[in-house]
Image (tube, helix red, strand yellow):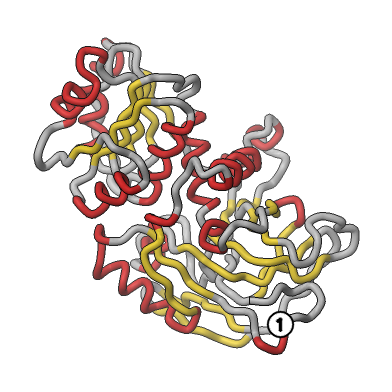
């Protein structure tokens, strides 16, 4: 079985390893698509603070159940699936109250635990989420980032018809904006990349703004008028956008911090206090967020095709990273493709390609 392993920052080796065998309560998945995440790029650069080496990456993926271990009745062989990547203790305070996604000793497959960058991947059946047969493997791999968006939106409940700004139109920002729209919100999305704003419009997000051409306050006035701004999702992870959010959201408004900050930002707490602002963090997701993500994509409420930028085979994993570095904000989602070996096509438990 082929596996991609990052031995050190910037060095990926494709090696042959023994095929994993599912134990009791586990499922073996033949991986078909892996999405490359921004956090994966941090690992590539050696700048992810919680990842050591060597590491098998990959946490956004889709595939087909090939076999199951003892005691597993669902999912069934040949079913299209994805799976949650969290490894949790089940005993800490957050786990006990159901917030296992912020487990005190959380590990994530692809970072602190081996990920799915290999032809066959074994995981616990309880982490597996079934996909409709109508799903493409690209849509399946996009369930994970969509679940990030779904959970982020739940941190600002009752969006209804509220006026929402999403700062950052990369894959996560785009999906947050689409999810907020699906919840009934009026959405403005901003980015300094004209390419990404064009993708947003192709996803049906018509209200866009480039901060290099107009500041957030001017964009809000143009789009929402005197009604102003009630919720902001910060999806960039820099001080400038967080400052714009704090200075522009209306009194009593909500800011959800989705972006990952490499440098701790300064925040004008005086404004937060004076305007009674609510600032919420968001990290990952729970199973129900995955289920809703599948439903949103399946119902066509989340457009995925405009997000698909380029595909690379497993053997060219490092080339995919180099391409992302080169293109920067002129791409959205890059996929790693793994094909079903010819010798397995038509065999029991494995779907034809």
Graded by Cα atoms within 10 Å as few (under 14), some (14 to 19) or many (20 or more), the crowding at tag 1 reads few
Toward which corner of the image does residue 245 lie, by quadrant?
top left
Q: Residue at x 38, y 51 (%)?
A: 171
Left or right position of 69 against 264: right
Where residue 70 sits: x, y (%)?
Answer: 89, 63
For image coordinates 62% across by 35% down, the residue present is 99
Q: Is residue 48 visible?
A: no
43, above or below 203, in the image: below
Direction from residue 55 to residue 332 in the image, left or right: left
The answer to whether residue 229 is above or below residue 327 is above
Residue at 51% x, 74% y: name it.
Answer: 337
Q: Tell me the SS state at disc 1.
A: loop
Above or below — where is 142 with respect to 283? below
Q: Which residue is mark 1?
A: 345
Question: Residue 239 vs residue 138: left or right?
Answer: left
Q: Quadrant of the C terminus?
A: bottom right
């Amino acid at each position: 079985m082929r596996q991609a392993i990052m031995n050190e920052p910037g060095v990926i080796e494709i090696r042959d390893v023994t095929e994993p065998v599912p134990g009791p309560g586990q499922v073996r998945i033949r991986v078909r698509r892996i999405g490359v995440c921004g956090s994966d790029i941090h690992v590539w650069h050696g700048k992810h603070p919680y990842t050591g080496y060597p590491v098998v990456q990959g946490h956004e993926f889709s595939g087909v159940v090939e076999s199951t271990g003892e005691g597993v009745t669902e999912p069934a062989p040949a079913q299209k699936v994805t799976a949650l990547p969290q490894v949790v203790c089940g005993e800490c305070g957050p786990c006990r109250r159901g917030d296992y996604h912020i487990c005190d000793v959380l590990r994530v497959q692809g970072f602190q635990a081996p990920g799915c960058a290999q032809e066959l991947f074994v995981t616990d059946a309880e982490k597996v989420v079934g996909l409709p047969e109508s799903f493409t493997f690209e849509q399946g791999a996009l369930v994970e980032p969509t679940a990030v968006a779904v959970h982020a939106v739940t941190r600002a409940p009752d969006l209804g018809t509220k006026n929402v700004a999403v700062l950052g139109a990369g894959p996560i920002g785009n999906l947050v904006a689409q999810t907020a729209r699906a919840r009934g919100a009026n959405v403005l999305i901003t980015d300094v990349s004209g390419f990404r704003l064009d993708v947003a419009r192709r996803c049906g997000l018509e209200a866009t703004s480039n901060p290099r051409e107009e500041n957030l306050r001017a964009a809000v006035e143009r789009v929402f008028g005197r009604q102003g701004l009630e919720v902001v999702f910060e999806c960039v992870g820099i001080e400038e956008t967080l400052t714009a959010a704090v200075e522009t959201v209306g009194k009593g408004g909500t800011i959800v911090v989705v972006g990952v900050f490499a440098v701790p930002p300064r925040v004008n707490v005086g404004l937060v206090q004076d305007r009674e602002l609510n600032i919420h963090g968001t990290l990952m997701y729970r199973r129900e967020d995955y289920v809703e993500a599948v439903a949103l994509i399946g119902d066509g409420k989340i457009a995925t095709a405009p997000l698909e930028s380029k595909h690379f085979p497993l053997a060219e994993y490092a080339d995919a990273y180099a391409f992302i570095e080169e293109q920067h904000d002129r791409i959205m989602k890059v996929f790693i493709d793994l094909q079903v070996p010819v010798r397995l096509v038509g065999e029991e438990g494995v779907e034809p390609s």
